Image (cartoon, rainbow, N blue to C red):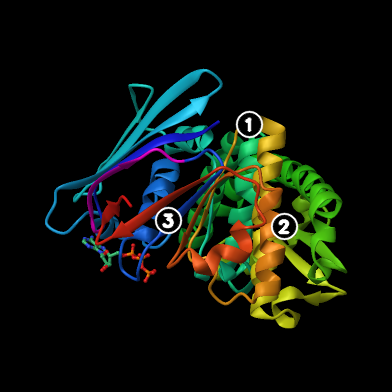
């Protein structure tokens, strides 16, 4: 299951381009400012309804144009599934899957699992737990089909609870206790899904990936559910504090999933190049696991792969990419900088040269 066709209109500096990518490896090459990241961003937008580099939707629309449009065709066995998304200046998003209008972005994400690695992806280690929760929940979302509904219901209850903690109406303690029943049930369900996923994630990582580089020796995943002990006791003991804070301080919305090496946090002990290698390893583990469990081929977008990596680390990245089952889109300024990676890969390659927002044919 891969993208067999992509077309963009008025996306960033790209007026109109169409391409038929390889189901294996696609190289997007071009000078700084040519439009490589924009092309990757468009694929991400097609599969998630969002950009990976801005919250300001207007920036995705080509200057002075009314809307940006991205179309794609996803091959699933003998079926070609057309998908399309557009966003206009007002922020209105139109979505079509197999010719049917849809309002649910999650439906799009289900059809086309995507992950991205950019020079900013270090946020997974240096950012707060929110980034890591997002990473964890993306995996859980794809492999546990009920997770999304439970997670949505939990967030509704959390919103109610937080509103009561903030506004403190006269009978707020009674009302909070009423919501806590559902809060606990949903929180425990989320925790069960996450723990089950992490256990499979760790199994896959250590079995298939851990031996690729000595950088991964002594690595352990640590999961913090967001509370310790019985959640009902925790909510009770924290109630006074939560009323002062005006929000719920414990629960699955505070979970963390991080990595330690010999007991030290990875971001404190690993070099940037080593962290980048770990990042590749984690994203590839996630994508391969999604593929293994759902039979959905996912997409991995890698922006500016060669930056900051020595030839030795690039060699390890190549080994990781060799076992990566995703459809790959990799951007770089030149093919030369990718040679240590590409020459080790036995994958079908398509190359796309971008210049001033246009595809150049050689
Ligand atoms: N909304 C927009 N309308 C028109 N042009 C835009 C818009 N947003 C960004 N651009 C321009 O698009 C060009 C392509 O940017 P992009 O980030 O895709 O380049 P790139 O090839 O990835 O470059 P680099 O190698 O430096 O990362 C830039 O010149 C940028 O200024």
Image point 59% across, 42% down: which residue? 151
| Side of 58 where 176 appears, left or right | right
Specify which label sits upstream in the sequence, 1 or 3.
3
Of residue 286 and residue 127, the one placed in the foreground of this image is 286
Specify which label sits upstream in the sequence, 3 or 2.
3
Res. 145 mark: 1
Q: Would residue 180 be visible to someone looking at this image?
A: no
Task: Please tell me whether residue 310 belongs to the stretch shown in magenta.
Answer: no
Of residue 227 and residue 240, the one placed in the foreground of this image is 227
Image point 80% across, 47% down: which residue? 204
Q: Residues within 10 Å of mark 2 (few under 14, many from 20)?
A: some
Q: Would residue 83 be visible to someone looking at this image?
A: yes
Badge 1 residue CB within 8 Å of ligand 1:
no
| Side of 24 where 284 appears, left or right | right
Query: Could you tell me how far apart the alpha carbons at marks 2 and 1 are, in whole angstroms?
Result: 31 Å
Query: Could you tell me how far apart the alpha carbons at marks 1 and 3 are, in whole angstroms?
Result: 33 Å
Specify which label sits upstream in the sequence, 2 or 1.
1
- Residue numbers of the magenta segment: 13-21
Secondary structure of the residue carrying tag 2 is helix
Image point 39% across, 50% down: which residue? 50
The answer to whether 257 is drawn above or below residue 24 in the figure is: below
Res. 79 mark: none
Occupied quadrant, residue 343: bottom right
Which residue position holds label 3?
Answer: 28
Magenta stretch, main secondary structure, is strand
Res. 319 mark: 2
Occupied quadrant, residue 117: bottom right
List x then y, in percent, for residue 209: 79, 55
């Amino acid at each position: 299951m891969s993208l067999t066709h992509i077309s963009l209109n008025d996306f960033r500096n790209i007026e109109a381009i169409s391409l038929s990518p390889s189901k294996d490896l696609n190289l997007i090459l071009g000078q700084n400012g040519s439009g490589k990241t924009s092309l990757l961003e468009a694929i991400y937008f097609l599969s998630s309804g969002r950009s990976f580099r801005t919250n300001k939707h207007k920036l995705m629309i080509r200057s002075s144009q009314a809307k940006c449009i991205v179309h794609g065709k996803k091959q699933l066995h003998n079926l070609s599934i057309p998908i399309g998304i557009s966003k206009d200046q007002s922020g209105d998003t139109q979505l079509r899957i197999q010719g049917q209008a849809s309002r649910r972005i999650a439906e799009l994400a289900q059809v086309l699992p995507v992950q991205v690695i950019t020079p900013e992806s270090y946020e997974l280690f240096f950012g707060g737990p929110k980034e890591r929760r997002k990473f964890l929940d993306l995996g859980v979302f794809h492999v546990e089909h009920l997770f999304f509904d439970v997670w949505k219901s939990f967030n509704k209850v959390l919103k109610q609870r937080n509103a009561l903690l903030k506004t403190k109406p006269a009978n707020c303690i009674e009302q909070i206790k009423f919501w806590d029943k559902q809060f606990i049930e949903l929180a425990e369900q989320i925790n069960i899904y996450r723990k089950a996923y992490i256990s499979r994630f760790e199994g896959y990582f250590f079995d298939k990936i851990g031996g690729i580089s000595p950088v991964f020796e002594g690595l352990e995943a640590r999961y913090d559910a967001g509370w310790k002990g019985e959640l009902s006791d925790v909510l009770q003991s924290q109630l006074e504090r939560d009323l002062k804070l005006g929000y719920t301080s414990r629960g699955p919305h505070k979970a963390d999933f991080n990595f330690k090496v010999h007991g030290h946090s990875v971001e404190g002990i690993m070099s940037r190049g080593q962290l980048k290698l770990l990042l590749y390893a984690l994203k590839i583990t996630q994508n391969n696991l999604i593929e293994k469990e759902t039979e959905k081929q996912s997409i991995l977008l890698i922006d500016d792969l060669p930056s900051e990596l020595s030839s030795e680390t690039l060699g390890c990245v190549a080994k990781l990419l060799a076992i990566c089952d995703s459809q790959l889109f990799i951007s770089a300024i030149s093919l030369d900088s990718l040679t240590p990676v590409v020459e080790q890969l036995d994958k079908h390659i398509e190359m796309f040269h971008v210049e001033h927002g246009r595809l150049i044919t050689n």
